[in-house]
Amino acid sequence: MASCQSLSDAPVVINDTTLRDGEQTAGVAFSLTEKLAIASALEQAGVTELEVGIPAMGPAEQEVIQAITASLTTAEAMGWCRMLPQDIACCRGLGLDWVDLSIPASEQQRQSKLGLTESQLLAQIPERVALAKDLGLRVCIGLEDASRASLSSLLRVADAAQAAGASRIRYADTLGILEPFGCFEQLNALVNHTDLQVEMHAHNDLGLATANSLAAVRAGAYSVNTTVAGLGERAGNAPLEEVVAALALLPSLPARSAPAIALAKLPQICQLVALSSGRQLSQQKSIVGEGVFTHESGIHVAGLLKDPNNYQAFQPEIVGRSHQMVLGKHSGTRAIQAIYQHQGIELSHSQAQQLRGWLRDWAECHKRNPNQLELAAFYQQLQTINSEQIVAA
Ligand SMILES: CC(=O)SCCNC(=O)CCNC(=O)[C@H](O)C(C)(C)COP(=O)(O)OP(=O)(O)OC[C@H]1O[C@@H](n2cnc3c(N)ncnc32)[C@H](O)[C@@H]1OP(=O)(O)O
Ligand SMILES: O=C(O)CCC(=O)C(=O)O
């Protein structure tokens, strides 16, 4: 079976699973209000698919899922199920568009979790897909632990899924053990083999979730799972903000790739999820961390002052941010003069040099950048020395 998927001009679909895998982060539990707010923010930013929860968790979760699907106006909603009749039945009447029917794809998990052989699982696929389709749902077969499965076995599952009338398969790197080159090979083999849409689900145990998601896109994946700020099991999933910014901003990725997502809304969405999850964003979290557009080093600031392109990967305004320049241990005289000038104070080169020395000691002692009041105090000190020198002369 040959697919023309990789030749498609359609942008990559983001299937965001903050409300399902994101909420599986140990200790995270969103309220209905929080889930509605997150779903709405994602939809307004242009995310077209949301994995919204697990109907088999029971009536309360089902009510929440129903409320979310009722609130969505354009985005499609997916529910996550084990490929069990009782789980599928829980999806009835929830307003879902999609269901992910998850099966273990590796021999390890098939045998050890379920005690089933590959052929026993394959034999279940037609009946379970039919049950879901009878509920009016489009079906994605979730290949849990696919990265520890043999490719030949994955291809057999893809064939069975396609024959049963599924629309998509999800390649899950459940344990985050893939690297981008291997990921490309696996996804490319699947994409070239099946007519189904192929979705990538990456985990970040080795810090490679974004890289693997981009490799999957290069390999022709139709869709990619993300979570806001990379929330999710253990080290989390591929962060929405990283994947969509990379797809939009990296010229080396296929031109078809970038989904129409409002990048400038990413910081706000990440703040909302940070607040709702109780998980603070790290200062250095790419795209949205407080410190990622803040510059202290003398050579960098001097370069930025001449032309921002000297030290920016992309304009921070694109992702709703701006450059900030601060003074600290690594400041140079150019930065010192520019920052004081911004406060209406002209410093001579020798004054800036003197301040540069003070800043080094001060920063080592305080482990932070001085604030405006502290900078004013430095200036007072400079003036005092200056007037003492005039008196002495
Ligand atoms: C990689 C992933 O992220 S998978 C998604 C994981 N997410 C979650 O588990 C969060 C929500 N889960 C829950 O609320 C609960 O686990 C429930 C409601 C789904 C099930 O609860 P319980 O019935 O109490 O079962 P419990 O959680 O203890 O055990 C899970 C059962 O599912 C089975 N199971 C796991 N995956 C599958 C699958 N794909 N297909 C069929 N059965 C499966 C396990 O084998 C186990 O059954 P067993 O003990 O009879 O072998
Ligand atoms: O089977 C799936 O849908 C993927 C489940 C998942 O979250 C994972 O394997 O990490």
Image (spheres, helix red, strand yellow):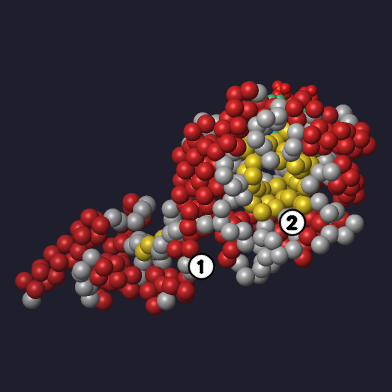
The image's mark for residue 314 is 1
Q: Residue at x 83, y 35 (%)?
A: 130
Q: Secondary structure at mark 1?
A: loop
Callout 1: few (<14), some (14-19), or many (20+) C-alpha neighbours within 10 Å?
A: few
The image's mark for residue 58 is none
Q: Secondary structure at mark 2?
A: loop
Q: Residue at x 62, y 70 (%)?
A: 251
Q: Is residue 131 visible?
A: yes
Distance CA(mark 1)–CA(mark 2): 26 Å
Relative to the observer, which residue lies in front, 330 or 289?
289
What residue is disc 2 on?
221
Res 59 quadrant in image: top right
Q: Residue at x 82, y 37 (%)?
A: 129
Q: Is residue 181 above or below residue 386?
A: above
Marks counted in the figure total 2
Relative to the observer, which residue lies in front, 89 or 345?
89
